[in-house]
Image: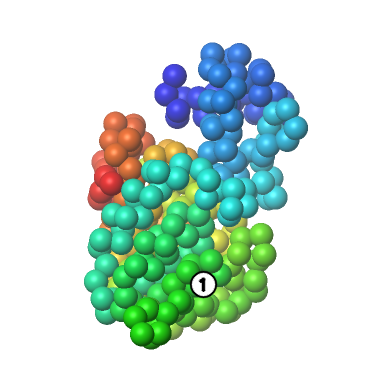
Amino acid sequence: MLQEKRHQRILALLAGSGHVSTERIAKDLGVSRETVRRDVLVLQTTGRLRRVHGGVKIGGPESEAPLQQRLQTNTLQKRAVVQAAARLLQPGQSLFIDAGSTVSMLAEELASLQGLTVITNSFDVALKLAGPGHEGAPRHQVHLLGGRPRPGLAATYGDSTVAELMRWRPDWAMLSPVGIEATLGASSFEPAEAELARAMVRQAHRSVLLADDSKLGVQSRLSFCTPDQIHALITNRRAARHPALLALQQAGCAVSLA
């Protein structure tokens, strides 16, 4: 059974009772408990469910996994995506970067470059890019957006964060959605995240979405970018035959496989 079909079946089981055991999921899908564990980790990042002892429950506002946990999910696929994104950038260019596990990996890639202006609300991204380069000079100009800190998300959000970013007109916005599909477009779980991403898309000259194949066909709660607003969607090669990717291309979304 394809991953997308398994995810749909897990969510269907949850819709019936609100709680389902790992054992029942494995039996219903005819897969191993390890496969169920991997699928649950992916679905938890979308906020649609949360893990509890012995199984899963329907997700709630508290259910999006912490950053450090998400960094351990689909690592190879995310690494391929961010490496392709880094190749788009040239010294002297400016970009928005939002918060999340994929863009945290992007910051690691950009740390080996120099000469960029980076505007971000992510503590993790800012710290990774603010280090010195050759002879102690700053490698990049990094601007951490002010606003209300959200410890669980390791980033700033709110009206003042959006107001501050509206002063910028960067070359790029490089964002990582919770999910992306042809009808809703790119979406986020938290209202504040969606509001910030929406403003970044509006202000940047080009918007690039970084999404591994586990995010394709996924709808989270709030849309922030329609397919025709996307300069490029970068995803990993395993997504090539994904039905959701084909639908996105038909909706006018340019796709790059990493």
Considering depth in this image, is 112 or 222 the residue closer to the camera? 112
Relative to 250, residue 33 above or below:
above
> Quarter-wise, where is residue 229 in the image?
bottom left
Q: Amino acid at mark 1?
A: Leu
Q: How is the image coloured?
A: rainbow
Q: Residues within 10 Å of mark 1 (few under 14, many from 20)?
A: few
Residue 198 point in image, percent of width and height: 46, 64
- Callout 1 secondary element: helix
Residue 183 point in image, percent of width and height: 40, 43
Residue 169 visible to an observer of this rendering: no
What residue is rendered at 55% in x and 19% in y?
32
What residue is rendered at 39% in x and 43% in y?
77
> Quarter-wise, where is residue 48 in the image?
top right
What residue is rendered at 51% in x and 81% in y?
164
What residue is rendered at 29% in x and 31% in y?
241
Considering depth in this image, is 41 or 242 the residue closer to the camera? 41
Relative to 228, residue 33 above or below:
above
Residue 226 point in image, percent of width and height: 38, 54
Relative to 61, residue 129 above or below:
below
Residue holding disc 1 = 127
> Quarter-wise, where is residue 46 in the image?
top right
